[in-house]
Amino acid sequence: MCESLNQLNAQVFDMFCSIGGLTYGLQEAGITVKAGLDIDSSCRYAYEKNCGATFIEADIRNISFSDISTYFNDAEYRILVGCAPCQPFSSHTAKRKSCQLDSRWNLIDEFLRIILEGQPEVISMENVPQLMDKAIYHKFKRELTDAGYKIADGVISCTDFGVPQKRCRLVMLGSLLDRIDMPKSAAKEPKTVRQVIEHLCPLEHGQSSETDPLHVCSRLEPINLKRIRASRPGGSWRDWPTALLPNCYKRDSGLSYGSVYGRMQWDKPAPTLTTQFYRYGTGRYGHPEQDRALSLREGAILQTFPEQYQFVAPGEKTPFTKIGRQIGNAVPPSLASAIGRAITDHLKKREKRNV
């Protein structure tokens, strides 16, 4: 029986590849990823530098399966993966009546179109759990099933797959070959904030590391510096004296916003990272001890990018908010690796039956 997907003659193409979280994790699982596609050109350096794959700048709406088919190199097993932008389906966005007017809402339909055009043997998709309840996802699954795909899907906790973060994601796998199983957890205990970022050098707010330009954190306004000094790990603005409260939190309507302006706890997983994890006031993203919000590097590590992962070319200025958004949007590589192992197990079982 073949011991790797390279021997199995399989190739992967990554739709919506961004900075490479999904590609990097799949490669850790032994899968060859030849190329990825994304509309955001600023992702090119990180993707190609860390993943060693070709970055294709394009809008999925303007391509067909034939445009990417050469990257499969006549592989016996063609694997198409992707994580369409999740913002239109998030719990925050779904509260707005205009969420379906978001230009990204129908990108999942474009992913479906390309799958049906090319009929790759294996497919995978990752997104926010809220998508599972949407009609657009039911249509996605129904049309794949009608095309012969055997589907496995469900919402999984990323802490079960080595991600030190309270993050749940919808994962879907499909195969034209046979039944495919969901990723299996290998983690015994959830990783904690302390385990992954305590070793990093301390920073003052607004400061950056002399040795790692990505270990940089945002500057706090004087009032927020007072607030974080009054905050305790696992707490919120409710711990502050009244003089530090914003006016909105002095009214009854502000009482429901309890998960902001807090510090993380050393010995627990981090809260779910968003695209604004580097801002103290947007969640419990205060450092457990230091009077500042998370640095970009700390956010990347909590998303399970390796500490050496490069996001900008040497000598180039770090585009703070753009990289923060890319990190917050990324598929955690440790989760991607688990998805990759599920795919390799699936194909190895098939090879064994064919011997």
Image (cartoon, rainbow, N blue to C red):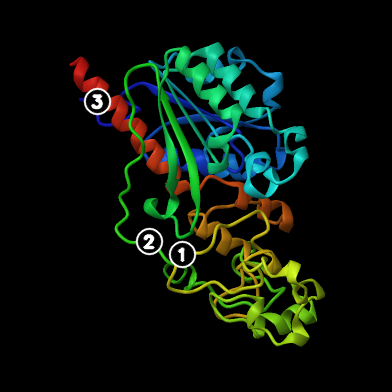
Q: Amino acid at mark 1?
A: Pro
- Calculate the distance from the C-alpha at mark 1 to the C-alpha at mark 2: 7 Å
Residue drawn 36% across and 21% down?
9
Of the numbered discs 3 and 2, the one sitting upstream in the chain is 2
Q: Which residue is mark 2?
A: 190
Q: Which residue is mark 3?
A: 349
Which disc, if any, is residue 269?
Answer: 1
Q: Amino acid at mark 2?
A: Pro
Query: Looking at the rendering, which quadrant does residue 342 occupy?
Result: top left
Q: Residue 130: where, in percent of width, then height? A: 57, 42
Query: Looking at the rendering, which quadrant does residue 261 occupy?
Result: bottom right
Query: Of residues 259 and 19, which is closer to you in this image?
Result: 259
Q: Residues within 10 Å of mark 1 (few under 14, many from 20)?
A: many
Disc 2 element: loop
- Residue extending farthest to the left is 355
Q: Nearer the viewer, mark 3 or mark 2?
A: 2
Q: Quadrant of the C terminus?
A: top left
Which disc, if any, is residue 346?
Answer: none
Instruction: Look at the numbered discs 1 and 2 and tell me whether their residues touch, using CB distance below 8 Å.
Output: yes
- Calculate the distance from the C-alpha at mark 3 to the C-alpha at mark 2: 30 Å
Q: Nearer the viewer, mark 1 or mark 3?
A: 1
Q: Amino acid at mark 3?
A: Lys
